[in-house]
Image: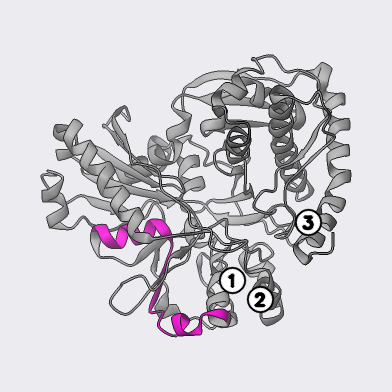
Amino acid sequence: MYLGIDLGTSGVKSILIDDDQTIVGEQSSRPLEISRPHRCWSEQDPDLWWNAVCESLDGLAAHHGPALASVRGIGLSGQMYGATVLDASDKPLRPAILWNDTRTEKQCADLEVRAPDVRRIAGRKPTPGVTATKLAWLRDNEPHVFDQVAHVLLPKDYIRLMLSGDKASDMADSSGTMWMDVAARTWSDTLLDATDMRRSQMPTLYEGTEATGLLRGQLADRWGIKRRPVIAAGGGDNACGACGTGVIHDGEGTLSLGTSGVLFVAMNNARPSPDHAIETLCHSVPGVWHQMSVILSATSCVNWLARLVKRPAADLVAELGTVLQAPSSVVFVPFLDGCWSPRNNAEIRGALIGLQHSSGDEELTRAVLQGVAFALLECADAFRTTGTSIDTLLAIGGGSRSDVWLSMISTCFGVELRVPEASELGAAFGAARLGMIASTGADVSDVLTPPKINRTISPVRDLARAYSDAYRTWLSVIPEVRRVSLAVRAGTA
């Protein structure tokens, strides 16, 4: 048996797979809360993560004890970019600053001044979400904390520390910190120096398929595991999701509709994008890279609307049916947490434009889905400017349960979307697969195979022009929405 643990923003998912990669057990934790004490801030207490992991694994032990007892390998996946700062005794110094925290715009500009070659080394331009600028913010705003930082770990690597005592990370997750030379797959002294950090504060780097240590004996006893399993380096949630869906070859891609929206395409070489906020990162698989673009709010936009109208999100989406209709006349800008990619714009916020007395729940829901689709299309267009070809994509994440949303995105992109089985478990499943490779030494291509396809969504050609026109309208309003967002913040609107 092999165990995959995925530390998400909203909770922990753990799954067990057998030697045939059949899922034999799964367990989720209770939801995790995010603290937003100030505008642009997003934080979580690392102790909440560990408690959620323990809750998840306690549940697996209670319901799938015999299977858990025979686990040989563990893989870790998790939310990316979070800055977990530890003191010399490995205790968190403050709440972790999360991936969707956008307070570091000033530090991004400063990093480009201090390291003019940052885009070539890190594969992208600095954006507020990355780990490096978070530490620079601590340096500038909480020097009493910064001076005590002995180690910095990404969220899933804090879980690794708790599980095994090892300070280690994988290439894929760490290449998002903006401290790595992505092409060379190692820490960059130039980028570390630019944020006044040292290699000694960084975890040891491994490929995602490699073992970083063993589960602590007392934890193996707690969960009834017969022998101490190896723990694979794993990856960030998106790289592990790609491992779960077998996206490890050049040109293959995924579209993830979760809390955030992610476009991911595997590549056989590092391909920096200096002109857009597109990430070129290492994959969890040796010798493979990937290009990735993230919009900070995807299904969270639907959940926001659900709270606003006081109805379940699933009911709102279900009312749209399964057949794609013409575009909504209401324009929705989905940047509720700012825009990270492909435009680096932390100050822009969301907007609803074109409301009428007749605008009801159905019209607003269609507008919200459409706004997210257009934000993802902007990412795809930026990919294409770098020479990336997007021919077909696997759709994963909770939002992939909506055929009408997928049909809208497929029509906007002009590409076919394939929905794999168990798509919402992609990251945890991919982590379990990496645990299998680390513990058995199996060949990557034999384990990370493509999934069975549940259904295929094709573009609605008759509506392609209408959505293209609506997309151009959406693009045209972005500068004004940004202007108003800045004016509102400054109190001059």
Mark positioned earlier in the residue sequence (2 or 3): 2
Residue 148 within the segment the image draws in magenta:
yes
Q: Quadrant of residue 70?
A: top left
Type of secondary structure dominating the magenta stretch: helix
Point out which mark residue 347 bears. none
Q: Earlier in the sequence, mark 1 or mark 3?
A: 1
- The residue under the point 81% across, 23% down is 358
Residue found at the very far front of the displayed protein: 357
Amino acid type, residue under disc 3 in the picture: Ser
Q: Quadrant of the C terminus?
A: bottom right
**Image position of 168 with respect to 481: above or below:** below
Please name the residue that numbered disc 1 is placed on. 133
The residue closer to the viewer here, 462 or 184, is: 462
Q: Residue at x 56, y 31 (%)?
A: 399
Cα gap from disc 2 to disc 3, whole angstroms: 25 Å
Q: Nearer the viewer, residue 204 or 224?
A: 224
Q: Residue 300: image x %, image y %?
A: 58, 40
Look at the image and tell me whether residue 422 can be seen: yes
Closer to the camera, 477 or 254? 477
Q: Tell me the residue that label 2 is attached to.
A: 111
Residue located at (24% from left, 60% from top):
164
Answer with mark 1 or mark 2, whichever residue precedes in sequence: 2
Residue count near mark 3 (Cα–Cα under 10 Å), binned few <14, some 14–19, many ≥20: some
Q: Confirm or deny contact between disc 1 and disc 2 (CB under 8 A).
A: yes
Q: Which stretch appears magenta?
A: 141-163
- Quarter of the rendering occupied by the N terminus: top left
Amino acid type of the residue tagged 2 in the rendering: Leu
The residues bearing labels 1 and 3 have C-alpha atoms spaced at a distance of: 23 Å
Please, what secondary structure does the residue beneath circle 2 have? helix
Q: Residue at x 30, y 48 (%)?
A: 53
